[in-house]
Amino acid sequence: MGSPKLSKSPIPSASASASASISSSSSPVQESPFSNYISSLSPIKHDKAPHVAQGFVGLSSPLVFTSPRINTLGRPQSSSVKISQKGVGDKKIINESCILERSVTESQEGLVTDIKNEDIKDNVAVQLGSSSECVDEYLADPVETDCAKSAYSVKLNLKQSNNVLQSSVNGLLDLKNIKFGRKNNVGREVDAAQFLSGRSEESIERKLTSDEKLLKIEDEQGSAQGISDGFQKFDSDRFDLSSKEKECKNFGPQKDGHGDGCSNFLQQLPGSLPGVQSYEGFAKNIGGDADAPVHSMKHEASELQRSMSRRCLQFGEAQPEATATCSISTNRANNIISSTSLATNSETESLSSSHLDLSAKSRTRQLVNLSQLAMNMIPQCYGKSSLTVLKPSGIGLHLNSIVNAISMGQGGTASMKVAQAIKSTSTTSCQSTENIDNCSDAFEKVSTPQGALEQKVCTIAGSASESLFAEESVEFHMTPNIKRKFSSEDGDRNDMFDQQRSIKKRKKLSNNTDGDCCKRCNCKKTKCLKLYCDCFAAGIYCAEPCSCQGCFNRPEYEETVLETRKQIESRNPLAFAPKIVQPVTEFPLSNREDGNRKTPSSARHKRGCNCKRSMCLKKYCECYQANVGCSIRCRCEGCKNVYGKKEDYCVTKEMVNRSGEISESRVAAKPKKEIFHSELCDPYHLTPLTPSVQCSDHGKNASISRLFSRRCLPSPESDLTVLSYAKSPRSPRTSDSNDILLETSSPSSKARELTSLSRVQLDPRRRSLTPGGSLHWHSSPIMPMSPLNDNKKLQGLDSADGGLYDILEDDMPEILKYTSMPIKPVKAGSPNGKRVSPPHNLHQLGSSSSGPLRSGRKFILKAVPSFPPLTPCIDAKGSSNQSRNNFQENRSND
DNA sequence: GAGTTTGAAACT
DNA sequence: CAGTTTCAAACTC
């Protein structure tokens, strides 16, 4: 092959060197004049050499250039310029002329085609030629849409060639193997050729036609090839690769030049050049195969997969700093796409379009890719920072995942120990958030051309970042260590910490239009150790966004926090229970029928509000703040809650009561307190068995179903409830009850658990507080229970607190409940929501805290998510009173 | 940003 | 348990 190439090559010296290189297959390709020649051929490089050099310098990750082969094949680093300079002094000048460039390209193509004609090599050559052609065209007008197709073909070629190269590289290790590899390569290439799009084939043919002379020449020389075929072929392969790589680089720079302000972005993120990355990585892989073990390849089962993974890895390797994440992403195809999209605007358009065209995918998909890209970028940005680079595994996921993570993490990312276990998820999201922020600028630059799509991505990312509390979460991860280090300097540290937080908070507040997600406490006198503090109430540690002063609600003061919590709980076991109760249960019975019931509107505030002047139309009202309607429990005056007026709720209740007189009868049967009555009236007290009932917010259906369930369900639990709530050893707080809860947990609980885990919860007790027994009863199909009865008993049994009357309502953190709900899930989780989502005691699981309540903690995790309304009654007083009143009212009505 | 309003939490 | 005080968020200017 070398000989033909030489003959083709205008430069004799090049040919001679080529032959030499061929003879010494093992010799690094770098030296091969042929490759140099080829590299020098492209004028584009020269023109944009500087750009390229810069971009690649940055890009030229050590990985890419580490291997000698890389230089040879890829000649990436500064290569293009260097090669052109040294190998072809004269040509250099010539190259600058477009004509020359064309001729050179053609000559290359011709060479390739010659190879193809000659032998099996042809396949490879064809690929190369097509690729080169495509590249050439692409280079000619990188921005044009037509290029997309060519680009696509190039990509295909790359994949194939990549495989070939790998095999060939492997072959290099052993001469014998080389031949083998060659054959294999040929076969692969043939297959690949088949796969090539008709367009690429056509282009190849056309090239062949135009380059007949060259081909003939090559054929003549080709006859003389002889034994060296294997090597030649290998060289050709390399050549192809190198040329491809070169081409890629060339077009990369061109694009760069075309791109608006993309150069900066590219420089910052050299890896952004998809083509370059792929090629470089490709070269690298080759080198890696030859020189060192291939990391990515090991994993890949199928060839295609291998190529894909390699690319991904390559990307990552090429850009160890930033792009590493991209390479790792689970979805290889997506990774590739995303990497492509990372390219400059022009590149993005062309390449993306190419993908789209070939795959006939919709623009929508591209958008998805972009989103993925955004995700990938996050890690990249992050990588720039000294912080650890996260693997894309998480990042590579979909925005949705991020958003979810964010929402989940909002409340709790910060603090808890448990959260650390889950770190991977939450951390990723957090980091990603930060990254997003950092990358926002770059994104904007890049987005200019593509505009809408990328902007969308940015927007999404931004929203995600907002919800994530990026900074906060990040800080949290780091905080513990730092803080512990400086534990002796708590005071100073506190001050500093406060200052930092205040600064960040301000920053965030200013940045965040939404503001809800980032809001945190601003306590000044309570030291964040009282329920006044939203963070504390939510069971999370204060974080950056907080502007609190003298805050003790931090990991370093964990003991203090826990003690305080205990105290508060001792006063009111349900103090940390979620305020907002989602009536809808996960029970299959209810849910399956009507999934919509779980609307936010159905949720209610457990204790109800007590508004007198705000008319429940401002955030002073907890119901309004939680985006839930007022209920019977509310003692508000002049309620005008847009999410549901108290009056409306009462009306609904009445209807329910009429339909089911059972409730009253049951009540009478039981030792009840007024609370029971209230329960009857309040759908939220219903047991999980009757999801519909809980859902009842205003819906009659729900109420009806609730009644129905009640009737159907006798109260087997009564005994249990009595036990648990009678303050007997089996009290709900006992581990037994917890166990029950665990059993009852629904499959969906896992997801919720994860979510909950993301949030660090300070208070272990909530779970313990929650009457696990109630959950169990509710959930257990075996025991059809009348929630009312249970509730009644519970309530009646309930101690002075009376908080237990709500037991029926699930204790599960609202975040979990709301995760699926449209209603500001974030808010629910956020402190702003004022504990909308109760903090879970996950962290306590890890903590060694002792105490009766804690015994059940472990179980809590499972139980919490799965079941809805076990909720302990937060406020026994008000609710009980209200319920009482309501009950009386209802009775009178009846 | 300071001051006011509001209602929950805490206290008595 | 009711009333009062304290507190911090929400709101207004």
Image (cartoon, coloured by chain):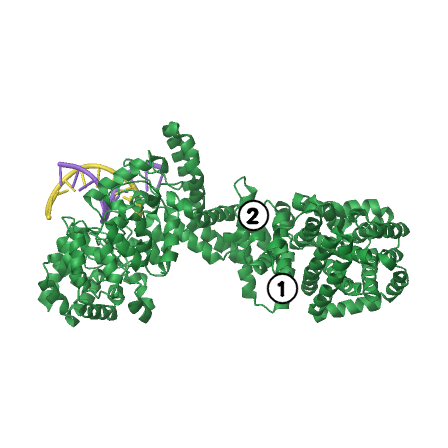
Chain colours: A green, B purple, C yellow
> A191 or A144, which is in the foreground?
A191
Q: Which mark is residue A86?
A: none
Whether residue A74 appears in this view of the structure is yes
Q: Label 1 to label 2, Cα distance in Å?
A: 23 Å
Whether residue A61 appears in this view of the structure is no
Secondary structure under tag 1 reads: helix
Can you give x and y, in whole percent of width and height, for residue A329 in the image? 55, 54
Can you give x and y, in whole percent of width and height, for residue A747 in the image? 36, 61
Q: What residue type is disc 1 on?
A: His
Can you give x and y, in whole percent of width and height, for residue A714 in the image? 17, 67
Tell which subunit mark 1 falls on: A
Q: Which mark is residue A380?
A: 2
10 Å crowding of disc 2: few (<14), some (14-19), many (20+): many
Question: What residue is drawn where x is 27% and y is 49%?
Answer: A856
Secondary structure under tag 2 reads: helix
Q: What residue type is disc 2 on?
A: Gln
- On the rendered structure, is A695 left or right of A803? right
Q: Which mark is residue A355?
A: 1
Question: What residue is drawn where x is 16% and y is 70%?
Answer: A660
A92 up-or-down from A892: above or below: above
